[in-house]
Image: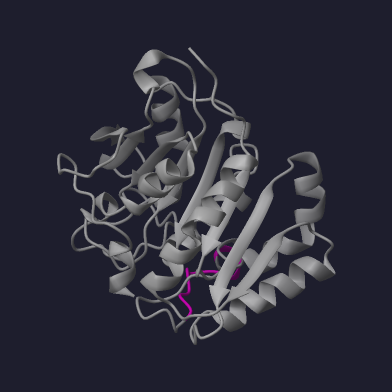
């Protein structure tokens, strides 16, 4: 699982990236984390000329270090190659010594869901020229980030119009990705599983139209079965969604190969950038 945090070009803030747009590191004081939440932000070419832009929030894989959010360069690079205009925000999803919080709320100082799904968009909308409504926000995640993206979107449908899981899973797991985490009560366990939310999802997405999209490699021995299961559950519940099985495993090759198509899919379902 650790290899997933470095998917794509490791684009460190201040490095020579070859991008036409700008990458910077930012942070804010998070009440949910009782500390600083760091994030990288990519501003597309033309940003300084004005206008407003949709935002893609990209969640990295886990386990991770406190700096793993900086390895997100393949996302803006792919957007530029396809001529797609969007801001990209890649938040910190773990701390050194707390490497696998699963993007969940665990209690005071470890409420990652609240920090990323609520505090972060509020800060970004206040400090950058975003399209500051749900039609301008997507959550995309890779591996454990795919789990986080799906769960946070289902918990916060009024805030996000697009969610994509790339080789993710849909219930909390241990760092190996093979053992279910228990959160302390049946209610907490149910809330942390996308499967238990399917029953009410058709009505919810009819009120808040949302692109629900996910894929997995045919040779992904850890997560293929659960992706197929969720596809079946959503189909049976008549919840509109996009699901694909691709050649490959839980690998960088798959994510890089499919990034252009899936980022284009996300941007097509967001409000377009406006001119200044």
Identify the residue at image location x=19%, y=42%. 13
Percent x, y for residue 189?
56, 68
Magenta: predominant secondary structure element? Answer: loop
Q: Is residue 266 magenta?
A: no
Q: Quadrant of residue 274?
A: top right
Instruction: Work out whether 108 lies above or below 130.
Output: below
Percent x, y for residue 63?
30, 68
Instruction: Work out whether 152 lies above or below 31.
Output: below
Q: Nearer the viewer, residue 130 or 79?
A: 79
The quarter of the picture where the N terminus appears is bottom left
Q: Magenta residues, as a range?
A: 180-188
Q: Would residue 44 appear left or right of 9 to someone viewing this image?
A: right
Asked if residue 114 can be seen in this view, the reply is: no
Q: Is residue 186 magenta?
A: yes
Q: Would residue 195 appear left or right of 189 to someone viewing this image?
A: right
Q: Residue furthest left?
A: 15
Asked if residue 129 can be seen in this view, the reply is: yes
Identify the residue at image location x=69%, y=46%. 210
Q: Quadrant of residue 230?
A: bottom right
Identify the residue at image location x=43%, y=21%. 129
Q: Nearer the viewer, residue 8 or 144?
A: 8
């Amino acid at each position: 699982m650790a290899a997933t945090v470095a998917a794509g070009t490791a684009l460190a803030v201040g490095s020579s990236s070859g991008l036409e747009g700008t990458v910077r590191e930012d942070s804010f004081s998070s009440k949910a984390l009782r500390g600083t939440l760091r994030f990288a932000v990519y501003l597309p070419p033309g940003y300084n000329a004005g206008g407003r832009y949709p935002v893609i929030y990209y969640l990295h894989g886990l386990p991770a270090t406190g700096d793993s959010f900086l390895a997100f360069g393949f996302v803006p690079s792919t957007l530029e190659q396809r001529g797609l205009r969007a801001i990209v925000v890649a938040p910190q999803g773990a701390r050194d010594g707390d490497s696998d919080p699963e993007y969940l709320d665990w209690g005071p100082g470890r409420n990652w869901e609240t920090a990323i799904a609520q505090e972060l968009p509020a800060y970004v909308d206040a400090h950058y020229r975003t399209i500051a409504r749900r039609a301008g926000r997507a959550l995309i995640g890779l591996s454990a980030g795919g789990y986080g993206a799906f769960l946070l979107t289902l918990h916060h449908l009024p805030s996000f119009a697009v969610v994509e899981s790339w080789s993710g899973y849909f219930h909390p797991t241990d760092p190996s990705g093979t053992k279910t985490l228990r959160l302390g009560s049946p209610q907490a366990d149910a809330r942390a599983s996308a499967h238990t939310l399917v029953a009410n999802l058709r009505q919810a997405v009819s009120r808040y139209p949302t692109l629900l999209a996910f894929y997995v490699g045919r040779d992904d021995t850890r997560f293929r079965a659960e992706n197929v299961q969720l596809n079946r559950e959503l189909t049976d519940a008549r919840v509109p969604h996009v699901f694909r099985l691709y050649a490959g495993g839980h690998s960088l090759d798959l994510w890089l190969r499919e990034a252009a198509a899936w980022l284009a899919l996300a941007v097509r379902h967001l409000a377009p950038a406006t001119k200044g």
